[in-house]
């Protein structure tokens, strides 16, 4: 998965129930456009550039893979949904809601429809002061000034005071109440992509399986009978070593751990790939190791049907995966479900994502986060 874009948006309203409009706008952005990961306080300030009622303003930080032009189109759509009417006459107007893109990563964009960073941000206290609440490291990519310097040099001398707070959309999503989440799934199910998004959005330490370094993997796909046992033994040793090391290394700046695998997948894959005699030996070694490994608070199993898995495998283009047969993937899925049935003591969340796209469709991602939150064990 490509890195998510980090976007700062400014939201303002000076008509009707201003706070309600802003809160609803934040919710719609979060549900339909991008994950809202940071929310400032609400600030009140006079109308800027025209005579009208004072504005309430806030800024939010969002994450998404969508490009800037797509974000701009969605912003206009959301403004329209929330009652904004754009008049043909020039100049500023009163509005129920106003959304501006302030920054997009650290990029400079200049086009007829979009200027980033926002051309007036350095002149607006109602943008700069709320940005301090986000506690982000920001430097204007053109002026080369940080937030404090921008505020000190801002020509806007109007009153801009924090007057209220908003509800953070992620406050209801208790993903960071877990200490350790392991995401599992078949080949091409999307487990690494989901781990990336959760780690980025919730400040988690990410533990990724180092599959690419295994020298037996390309050989296995060419000759399974010969290389199955050394492959599975190699994976078992590597997974044990990696997960032991990563879980032992505390990161004081991260809230929890999310991994795109757990060591029990070794047993599932080995049962499918090795002979019965080899599997009996393998299982004895596995059970010794499994006792020593910390168990996640939540196992997530991402299920995708075989056709979708094959599409995903083809799309990501790893040459040694292109000949994986459908029946092999079906056996792996069955192995996972057998494991789930025989381990009722574990907190396992099965998510069928065959018809979901949690990268492109924000509503699908929010659905997954809500399911993770619901799966939190009752204290």
Image (cartoon, grey):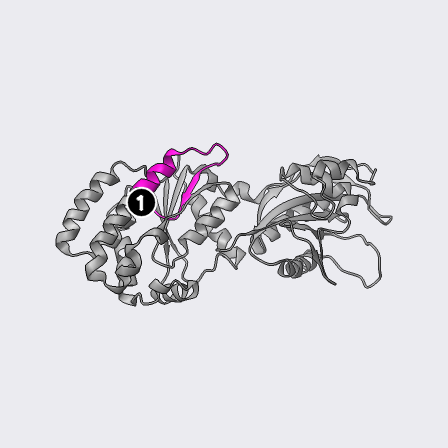
State the residue lying farthest toward the front: 215
Q: Which residues are magenta?
A: 241-261
Q: Is residue 272 visible?
A: no
Task: Tell me if residue 167 comes above or below residue 359 in the rendering.
Answer: above
Name the residue rendered at 76%, 51% in the picture: 119
State the residue lying farthest toward the left: 277
**Residue named by callout 1:** 239
Task: From the viewer's perspective, tell me whether residue 161 is left or right of residue 353.
Answer: right
Q: Would you identify the image quadrant in which residue 317 lies?
A: bottom left
Q: Would you identify the image quadrant in which residue 85 lies?
A: bottom right
Crowding around mark 1 (Cα neighbors within 10 Å: few <14, some 14 to 19, many 20+) is many
Q: In the image, residue 139 lies at what x, y percent?
A: 68, 42
Q: In the image, residue 108 lies at what x, y percent?
A: 68, 53
Q: Nearer the viewer, residue 321 or 73?
A: 321
Task: From the viewer's perspective, tell me whether residue 119 is left or right of residue 202.
Answer: right
Count of numbered marks: 1
State the residue lying farthest toward the right: 51
Q: Nearer the viewer, residue 83 or 226?
A: 226
Name the residue rendered at 39%, 48% in the picture: 260
Name the residue rendered at 32%, 67% in the picture: 323
Please tell me whether residue 248 belongs to the stretch shown in magenta: yes
């Amino acid at each position: 998965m490509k890195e998510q874009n980090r976007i700062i948006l400014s939201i303002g309203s000076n008509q009707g129930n201003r706070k309600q409009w802003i809160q609803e706008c934040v919710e719609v952005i979060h549900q339909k456009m991008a994950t809202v990961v940071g929310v400032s306080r609400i600030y009140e300030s006079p109308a800027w550039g025209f005579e009208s009622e004072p504005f309430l303003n806030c800024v939010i930080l969002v994450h998404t893979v969508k490009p800037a032009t797509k974000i701009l189109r969605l912003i206009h759509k959301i403004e329209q949904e929330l009652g904004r009417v754009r008049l043909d006459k020039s100049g500023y107007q009163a509005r129920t809601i106003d959304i501006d893109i302030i920054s997009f990563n650290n990029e400079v964009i200049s086009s007829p429809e979009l200027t980033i960073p926002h051309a007036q941000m350095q002149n607006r206290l109602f943008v700069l002061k709320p940005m301090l609440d986000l506690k982000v490291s920001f430097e204007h990519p053109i002026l080369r000034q940080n937030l404090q310097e921008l505020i000190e040099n801002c020509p806007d001398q109007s009153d801009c005071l924090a007057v209220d707070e908003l509800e953070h959309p992620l406050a209801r999503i208790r993903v960071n109440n877990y200490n350790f989440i392991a995401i599992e799934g078949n080949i091409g199910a999307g487990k690494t992509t989901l781990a990336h998004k959760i780690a980025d959005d919730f400040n988690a330490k990410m533990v990724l399986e180092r599959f690419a370094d295994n020298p037996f993997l390309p050989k296995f796909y060419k000759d399974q009978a010969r290389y199955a046992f050394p492959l599975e033994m190699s994976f078992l040793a590597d997974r044990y070593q990696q997960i032991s090391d990563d879980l032992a290394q505390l990161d004081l700046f991260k809230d929890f751990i999310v991994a795109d695998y757990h060591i029990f997948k070794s047993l599932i894959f080995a049962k499918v790939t090795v002979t019965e005699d080899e599997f009996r030996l393998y299982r004895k070694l596995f059970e010794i190791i499994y006792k020593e490994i910390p168990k996640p608070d939540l196992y997530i199993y991402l299920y995708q049907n075989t056709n979708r898995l094959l599409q995903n495998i083809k799309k990501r283009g790893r040459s040694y995966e292109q000949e994986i047969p459908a029946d092999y993937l079906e056996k792996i899925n069955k192995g996972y479900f057998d494991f789930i049935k025989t381990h009722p003591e574990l907190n396992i969340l099965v998510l069928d994502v065959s018809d979901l796209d949690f990268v492109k469709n924000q509503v699908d991602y929010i659905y997954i986060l809500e399911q993770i939150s619901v799966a939190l064990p009752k204290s």
